[in-house]
Amino acid sequence: MTFKEYDVVALKSSIQAVHKDSQQPILLQAGQVGTVVMNFNNEAYLIDFSDAQGMTYVMETVPPVQLMLLHYEPVLVAA
């Protein structure tokens, strides 16, 4: 799947990362929500993971197979 800049995505599986401020190792759990900020030729994406106040705690490069696009509106189907 190809993602666009600013798409909201979730991780399909957990990955380890390093917290931006504390430099402590953290676990980004499956289902963790982030925003696509950069596309590396559809081979990987830079994802911004932020807290509820919008403060980034980690930016991680993630391959597309580990991401799923989140949808907020239903899609109409033909009757």
Image: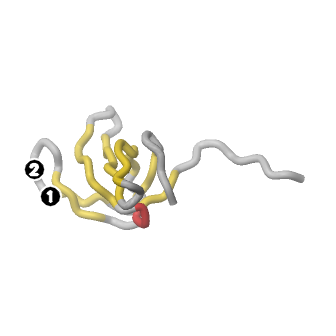
What type is the residue that disc 1 sits on? Pro
Q: Between 5 and 42, which is closer to the camera in this rendering?
A: 42
> Which residue is at a point 51% across and 60% down the rendered structure image?
1
Q: Position of residue 68 (x, y in %)?
A: 48, 58
Residue farthest to the front, as pictured:
41
The answer to whether the residue labelled 1 contacts the one labelled 2, judged by CB atoms less than 8 Å apart, is no
Q: Which structural element holds mark 1?
A: strand
Above or below residue 49? Residue 67 is: below
Q: Work out whether residue 70 or residue 51 is closer to the camera in this orientation and state it.
A: 70
Report which residue position mark 1 lands on: 25
Side of 76 relative to 25 (left or right)? right
Q: Residues within 10 Å of mark 1 (few under 14, many from 20)?
A: few
Q: Find the distance from the CA under tag 1 to the CA under tag 2.
A: 7 Å
Q: Which residue is mark 2?
A: 23
Query: Colour scheme in the image?
Result: secondary structure
Q: Position of residue 56 (x, y in %)?
A: 26, 39
Q: What's under tag 2, amino acid-wise?
A: Gln
Q: What residue sits 11% from the left and 53% below the top? A: 24
In terms of secondary structure, where does tag 2 sit? loop
| Quadrant of res 51 | top left
The residue lying at 37 percent from left, 49 percent from top is: 39
